[in-house]
Image: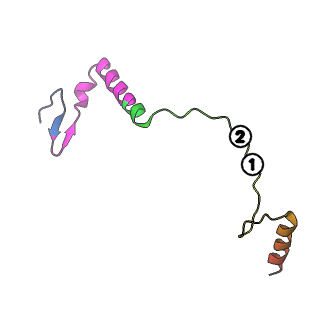
Amino acid sequence: MIVSPTLTLSGDTYLMPYRKLFLSRWSALMWAAGIIYMAVDTVGFAPAKQAETPPEQATVTDATGTSLTPSDVSNFANIASAL
């Protein structure tokens, strides 16, 4: 197989001539910079962090949407523990 400065065909895939690429530090740095650029371009940067607001107090409701009081919950717990 002849290795050229461009991509070469080996079987069904194109291979990068890594030996020739890494003989020069500058070409290796440019290759690495291209890989990093491609990763940042593909994935992007993390979004800016937003100020976190405390979660609102959740209300407990039954199946009909009526809110339950703490006494309702304790009554249910007592009945469930008796079973």
Above/below status of 32 relative to 61: above
Outermost residue on the right side: it is: 71
How crowded pointer 2 is (Cα within 10 Å; few <14, some 14-19, many 20+) is rated as: few
Q: Is residue 1 left or right of residue 59?
A: left
Q: Quadrant of the C terminus?
A: bottom right
The residue wearing badge 1 is 56
Determine the residue positioned at 77% across, 51% down: 57
Q: At 61% from the left edge and 34% from the top edge, which residue is drawn?
A: 49
Image quadrant occupied by the N terminus: top left
Residue occupying the point 37% across, 25% down:
33
Three-letter amino acid code of the residue under disc 1: Glu
Residue 58 appears in which quarter of the rendering? bottom right
Can you tell which mark lies on residue 15?
none
| Label 1, label 2: how far apart the Cα atoms are | 9 Å
Q: Is residue 18 magenta?
A: yes
The secondary structure making up most of the magenta span is helix
Q: Quadrant of residue 68?
A: bottom right
For the residue marked with disc 2, what is the amino acid? Thr
The stretch drawn in magenta includes residue 38: no
Q: Position of residue 76 (x, y in %)?
A: 82, 73
Residue hosting label 2 = 53
**Boundaries of the magenta span:** 10-37
Secondary structure state at the residue bearing disc 1 = loop
Residue 21 located left or right of residue 29: left
Side of 16 relative to 32 (left or right)? left
* Residue 28: x %, y % from top left: 31, 23
Q: Residue at x 63, y 35 (%)?
A: 50
* Horizontal and vertical percent position of residue 47: 54, 34
